[in-house]
Amino acid sequence: MSLFRRSIAEELDSMLPNLQLKPGSDRICMVAYHANSGRELVSSSSGVILVILEITANQLRVYVETNWREVVTVEDAPYFSEILDDLPERILHQPDETFSQFSTLSMGPLITEYIGECDSENAMKTLPLSSFALL
């Protein structure tokens, strides 16, 4: 069974026509992976490896770059894998705290790259949405 269900592009395509994303109220947090404690960006594209959508006050959707194992260094892979394993439970029971935590990452291999509204054209233009899948 695959860890990933739908790509973020499929999810956004299905949500936007139904107005399930509300401009000005739904938020997005993009987290980039940086090897060597945040000094060197390692990625084949934008550097963003996690995308967290807050689609209601207490509901999050988390997307991960599908090729994260090729992007994350061997040293950081156990750490990132543990985060991915923990996220489904955290977003279910502590969505606000989880979004807040990922919105303020500034040290280590995961750095908050962008926080804003889901309808932000600038954020969506820079992200290769087809390479992300729902966790």
Image (cartoon, grey):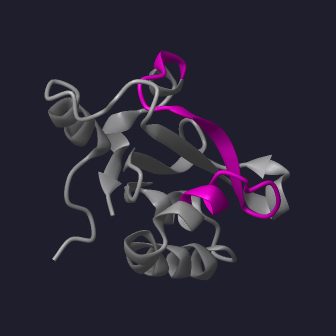
Figure check: 24 above or below 107: above
Q: Where's residue 11, x and y in %? A: 23, 42
Is any part of residue 32 visible from this angle?
Answer: yes
Q: Quadrant of the N terminus?
A: bottom left
Name the residue nearer the viewer: 42 or 52. 52
Tell me: 104 left or right of 99: right
Magenta span includes 89:
no
**Residue at image coords 41%, 33%:** 128
Name the residue nearer the viewer: 26 or 67. 26
Q: Where's residue 114, x and y in %? A: 63, 37
Tell me: 63 left or right of 97: left
Image quarter of residue 116: top right
Figure check: 10 above or below 19: below
Magenta span includes 104:
yes
- Tell me which segment is drawn in magenta: 99-122
Q: Where's residue 35, x and y in %? A: 74, 59
**Residue at image coords 68%, 48%:** 112
**Residue at image coords 60%, 43%:** 47
Name the residue nearer the viewer: 67 or 60. 60
Q: Residue furthest top?
A: 121
Is any part of residue 65 visible from this angle?
Answer: no
Q: Count how many numbered circles sit on residues in the image.
A: 0
**Residue at image coords 53%, 82%:** 82
Q: Quadrant of the C terminus?
A: bottom left
Name the residue nearer the viewer: 96 or 102. 96
Image quarter of residue 67: bottom left
